[in-house]
Amino acid sequence: MISMLKPSFPPGITLLPFNVPNFTTIKKMLNISQDNKINKVEEPKALLFARQCLLDGEIIALPTDTVYGLACDANNEQAIQKLYNIKGRDYHKPVAICVKNLNALRRYGKSDHLEDALLEGLLPGPITIILERSAQLSNRFLNPNTTKIGIRIPDFLFIQNLCSMFDEQPLALTSANRSGEPSSLNIHEFEAIWPKLGGIFDAGQIGMSEERRFASTVVDLSQPGFFKLVREGVALKSTLKTLHDLKNKSTRN
């Protein structure tokens, strides 16, 4: 049976080492300069450039299935701090991670109590699922005030392919805007922060309505048998339908 539950936020966890390779050779190979860091997502070099930016600890901007996002390696201490500084975000406010598939979700979030049918009904899509984090998320600067983590699998090919290329590491993901400003539906809406980014990946206008700016629906599924709606977002109706359908099925059984 699924009921409502308020989340709790105990302290965080410890750090594991992460090695960052030199980026100079890759930049020369791709013929990328500081003045040429905007790439169309369909360009052949875009994914490789994005991956190397992440490995170098850079922050990138890229499209998702909701709004444009800022992303970095979630297990890189310096990158997470840089992400918060660029966004002007309070360090007490958590950021989500992005992974390529349900296997990766289960690797980084404790989800043994969740059936595949439920997760497959919600993801991929514009939904963030909050779970207790696993030891695979070792960055002490990633949401240090909670043991939980929001996990996304966006329904957008470029970011899915990037997650697949990035050596199984998760991406920290937040919206591409300064805190307190509207989220972005095209790259020019966050032009003020371009100089601070390692790469910008352009898919054009990714939405026309203001409702699209509401970003993902956030639901806490960290406790067996309960859920907590944290943010309504753009997928509220479909999320609640999936959760209630599961509740009704469980009741009948």
Image (tube, helix red, strand yellow):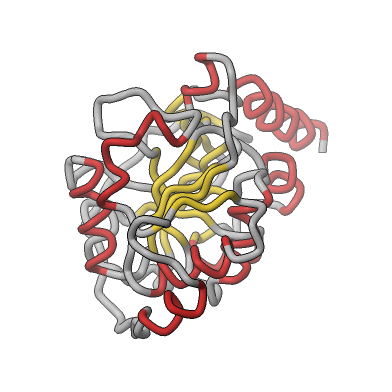
- Where residue 240 appears, x then y in whole percent? 63, 25
Residue at 53% across, 71% down: 166
**Compared to 143, does 57 lie above or below?**
below
Relative depth, front residue between 223 and 180: 180
Residue at x 17%, y 41% (from the top left corner): 90
Q: Quadrant of the N terminus?
A: top right
- The image quarter containing residue 101 is bottom right
The quadrant of the image that shows the C terminus is: top right
Q: Nearer the viewer, residue 26 or 106?
A: 26
Which image quarter: residue 236? Answer: top right
**Vertically, is 79 above or below 175?**
below
User: Percent from the top left, x then y, of residue 8?
Assistant: 30, 43
Q: What's the residue at 56%, 24% (across, down)?
A: 234
Residue 121 visible from this viewpoint: yes
Q: Position of residue 87 (x, y in %)?
A: 25, 42
Q: Which residue is at 61% across, 26% downward?
A: 235
